Structures are given as C-alpha cells and as structure tokens.
Image (tube, rainbow, N blue to C red):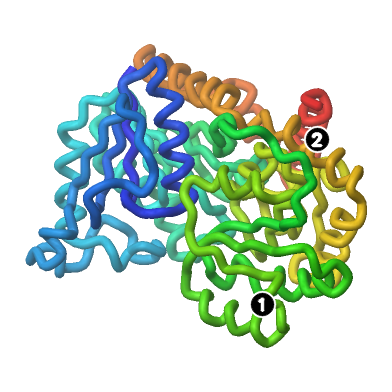
Amino acid sequence: MKISFLLHNAYGIGGTITTTFNLAHALAERHEVEIVSVLRHRELPNFTLDPRVSLRPLVDLRQEKNHPLHLRPAGVFPRAEYRYGQYSELTDQRIAECLATIDADVVIGTRPGLNVHLALQAPEHVVRIGQEHLTLDNHPPRLRTTLRRAYRRLDALTTVTEADAAAYRRKMWLPGVRVEALPNSVPDPVLPAVDGSAKVVVAAGRLVPVKRYDLLIEAFAMVAAEHPDWQLRIYGKGEEHDRLRQLVMDLRLWNNVFLMGAAAPMEGEWVKGSIGAAASNFEPFGMTIVEAMRCGLPVVSTDCPYGPGEIIEDGVDGRLVPVGDRDALGAALLELVRDDEGRRRMGRAALRNARRFAPGPVVEQAERLFTETVSARRAGRPVVPERARMHRALVSQGFAARDAAFASASSALRMVRKGQR
C-alpha cells in the first residue's frame, strides 16, 4: 500500500511534524510512504527522516517567497484556519496539482486547512483521511462551519484522544465518515531509562502563553525554597522567552531554573531528569508527556483538555492538578521531590504504562484503519462499521443516550488501561 502524508512544513519543529515522522517511519517497514511538505524554508528537516520515506516540497520559500502567486491570498485553504497567512494562490495551485496526480492508495491530511484541500480536491480513487491534532472545541466557529461541510467528503477522520473523537461524533454531522481516535506514537527509547536519582525537573515545548511556563516557574519556586539543590530545565523556543527569563530573574531563581533552548531529539535531555512537568491551559494530546514517561519519568501535569487525563493515571504514573493552580502544581512537584522511593515507583509505572504509545500498537491501529477503509471503498461498502453507525443512532436520540454512550466508552477505556498495567 502506498501512503502519502500532506504536511504543512516538514522542515520546521513541532508536535505534528514529530508524530508524522514517527508514524511514517514505522509504516515504512511494510509500506511505500511519502511526506508531501507544502512549504520548505531550509535545506534539511530538523528531524532525521528514515531513508525509506520520500520527502517532496511543493513551495520552496527560499526561491519562491516573492512569487507573484504567493503574494495573493489563498482561495481554498480556509481563511479561519490558524495558518491561513502562510498560504496563497500558489499553495492552492501546487496542492491541487499534487492531489490531481497522486498515485497513493491513502492520503492523510495533518491539519484542518489541508484536510479541506484533501476533501475537495483528491481524486475519487484515493482514500482520504483527515487528522486533527488540535480539538474541535479549540477551532473558531467559522472554521467549524467550513469543516462540517468539507469533512463530509472524507472517508475517515482521526483525533489524538478519545474525548475529541467523542466530541466530533456528538457535535458534527458527518454521515458515512469513520471517526476514530489514533494517538500519537513515540519511538522506543534508545537510552536506558532514568533511575530517579537526578535532582532535575524537565519540561519541553514551544515557549508560548498557552503552555504556562510562567506558572511552572512560579510553582517551582516552592521546590527551590525547600530543596535548593534541585533544578528546573525548560527546553524550547518561542515568543515567551524574554518574559520567562525576566520572571526567573525577578524570583531570584537563576541558580535553579534554566531556559535551555530547543533540543531535537529530546530523549537525551529527558534522561537527565527525574520528573517531567507540564503546566498547559490546553493540550490536545501531550506529546512531551509521553516522551518523558517513555524515558521513565513520572509527569506532573495540569489536567487540561484533553490529553493529559488520557495519558497520566493520577497517583500511579504521575500527578494531575487543576489548570492554573500554582500552589497545587508546586505541591505535586514537592510530593515527588520529597519521596525518593515514590518517585522511582511512579517512574517505573510511567515506563510500563506509556508502552501503549509505542509505534507498534499505534501503527497496528493505523494499518487496520487504512486497510479496512481501502477495502470498504474498493468493495463499495460503507467505511463506518455497523457498531459505529448504531452508536451514532443512539447519540441522535438525545442527550441522555449520548451521555450514557460516552460514559460507557470512558469506562471501557479505563478498563483497557488497567489491563495494560
């Protein structure tokens, strides 16, 4: 089977790029895989690409930034999409040409605007799968309206959490579209797992307001006051850098809190710590949480929508605290800092429980989705399984039925997680 991913910019840094590369690498074991990058701004990607995965850009900004068509606004890529300003009449044209001639069995869009292109422009013989790496509720109303119309032309839609998949089934009318949660995967670690002895808390991600690194630094001040030999290392770059550096200075934490800059891959940095931390107001999945856990770090995180609560089991492999609660975050960090054996026990549980996000289980689920959808299309059968159609009928009967179905799904998920420990 030939599988193509349509990606915004494979030459940048971000969670969607990371998980696309991870999935592409794993699928390349048994399939022909390519990544089509709409934009390119540098010679080589930041992340290492498996030589079995081909990469082709559509618009090279190094030569085409001032192309006449690139100076005109996009007409297909939705205006309400976050990346709209980076798209143009030139990207519209190149994406359309690419999809018109594509020879893949399955094409996967990796953001809402590209899913719209895929839904409207891919030829009928191609299985069209849209991926959502944000959440439905995070999209502005105008974009949700556009997606509701376009997504009906997809064969399948994947989300990174069960909660978001349930939201799409409840709130979007997508008859005939298979909606399924497909979590991000993290490669098997190369380095030995941590032993929990390092006096270091590690956090990683873009330095942007939603990640609330200011809250994390303020919470860590509680740790530093009681345990001045502990450090907080924050990896990443972004618009908040200068403000965070000033906060470190204001709190006199220059010997305890360090802004480390970007690091890729992060595995070599995770294993230098003993605790992972995340303080986001919003986290569609929580890639860095899984990365930390796969290295044996228990993670203290805000219980924000949607990802952390589906990854961390509070008190078992990490801690979940209320969003925006500095004192609760600091107390949870202190709990693990004070308890060496508890920290190590949670770290072992994190290593064990995070295996469900290894490439093997995730790729097996992805392959099943791709194979079943391709087979259904070729045989002229509905791509939505009968049980899913019955579930949608149940949901349509009213809020009580909807909530009962959602509660049942959540209960089933918890049982699965307990069985994996």
Rendered residue at 65%/44% (across/down)? 271
Front one among 342 and 120: 342
Give the CA distance from mark 2 to mark 1.
33 Å
**Image side of residue 229 versus residue 42, left or right:** right
- Residue 267 is situated, as x and y percent measured from the top left of the image, at 57, 43
Residue 46 x/y as whole percent: 36, 49
Percent across and percent down for residue 402 are: 73, 42
Amino acid at pointer 2: Ala
Q: Is residue 61 left or right of residue 161?
A: left
Disc 2 and disc 1 in contact, CB within 8 angstroms: no
Residue occupying the point 53% across, 53% down: 134
Query: Which residue of the protein is positioned furthest toward the bottom in this rendering?
Result: 250
Assess disc 1: are there few (<14), some (14-19) or many (≥20) residues with their C-alpha within 10 Å of its C-alpha.
some
Identity of the residue drawn at 50% across and 26% down: 366
User: Which residue is label 1 attached to?
Assistant: 254
Q: Which residue is mark 2?
A: 349
Which residue is pictured at 39% across the width and 65% down the height? 80
Q: Is residue 338 left or right of residue 2?
A: right
